[in-house]
Amino acid sequence: MASYDAIADLPLEIESCTFEGLELVLGEFERLTTVIKFSGGGHQGIGEDVTYDAVDHVAQQSAGPPDGLTGSFTFDEFSRRLDSIDLFPAAPPQRDISVDYRRWAFESAALDLALRQAGTNLAAILGREPQPVNFVNSMRLAGFEEGERSSIEPLRARLAIYPTLRFKLDPTNDWDDELIAALVETGAVDSLDLKGFYKGTPVDVVTDPELYAKLIDAFPDAWLEDPDVTEETKPILDPVSARVTWDAPIHSIADIEAMPWSPPKTVNVKPSRFGPISRLFAAYDYCEERGIGAYGGGQTELGPGRGQIQYLASIFHPDTPNDVAPGGYNDPEQATKPGLPSSPLQPSIDELGFRWVP
């Protein structure tokens, strides 16, 4: 049975929808998210909108929920209804990808509610046993201030407290031989996110074939995520194509099939990028049937969304370098103090619904 078929016919009763805004300030980065709350039949289902533009969250929370969300459905009928509901009624989203982010939030809340109303949870209905989740700490070693250079010290500070911690790093153009050698010496780098699909953002990196070659040689076992494949970089990447994986462009099975060196050995199946849960579950099944590895990715979730992606990792791909570390690892102060869970993260699913219990 396809994974989606197991949840498609779940009865769903939605009586009301409310929003709760969350906020976290990390240096100059202000992160806003919105918790979606559906109520019905004495239960509440929750999801998290991880849209990145603050103005989209402010508009949503001010305008309130759109019309057409309440009623009696199957889960699949509700998902199809969302096709015709404008989830940005106050103003169009700042960027197109936000449509999928918000769709994921509404559907994950509806799924949580439907499972609770049915008296079961996601792992049970899919017949999958939750497993300990391997995770990596995703980091950028350079600050965002002009002239602020990359430093290994934030990574070393984390390792001093959590010596078994593994990392997914964002190489930047100022990585020199000394820094690369120091990172190699830690033996803690599992993935390098080359940001080849980011243009016009604060995390842009200028494509540098020489840097690519250095990284490939220095980290022979690391995954190479989202390289910019150009006439200059493709000859460098061809011999190591089995290590190339994809994140930003992956929103569907068609996207997986469209990547260079298809099929890839592994891909980042980031739930919020897929939007509808039917599309996400189809991708899980597709990868499993074809022996394509998968790992999860986060979006700096501040609420239940983080637990939900940990939940999915635990039942679909627990042993891969999942970028789903507990939220405390995103906070430079908290990440250098004892008390955070270590990898692997032990399963902690709620008895009902689609929730990971903190």
Image: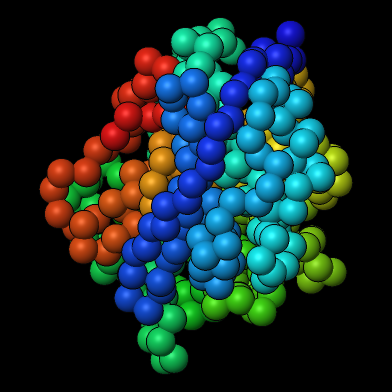
The quarter in which the N terminus is drawn is: top right
How is the model colour-coded?
rainbow
* Residue 350 percent coordinates (x, y): 37, 21
Res. 137 in view: no
Can you say whether 219 is above or below 1 in the image? below
Q: Quadrant of the C terminus?
A: top left
- Measured as percent of width and height from the top left, residue 180 is found at 43, 67
User: Looking at the image, which is closer to me, 234 or 33?
Assistant: 33
Q: Measuring 56% from the left and 21% from the top, which residue is drawn there?
A: 114
Foreground: 12 or 124? Answer: 12
Residue in the foreground of this view, choosing between 347 and 256: 347
Instruction: Work out whether 208 lies above or below 64.
Output: below
- Point out residue 108 in the picture as x, y percentages from the top left corner: 57, 35
* Quadrant housing residue 254: top right
Residue lying farthest to the bottom in this orientation: 147
Q: Position of residue 312 (x, y in %)?
A: 52, 29
Residue found at x 43% / y 22%: 42
Q: Is residue 18 visible?
A: yes
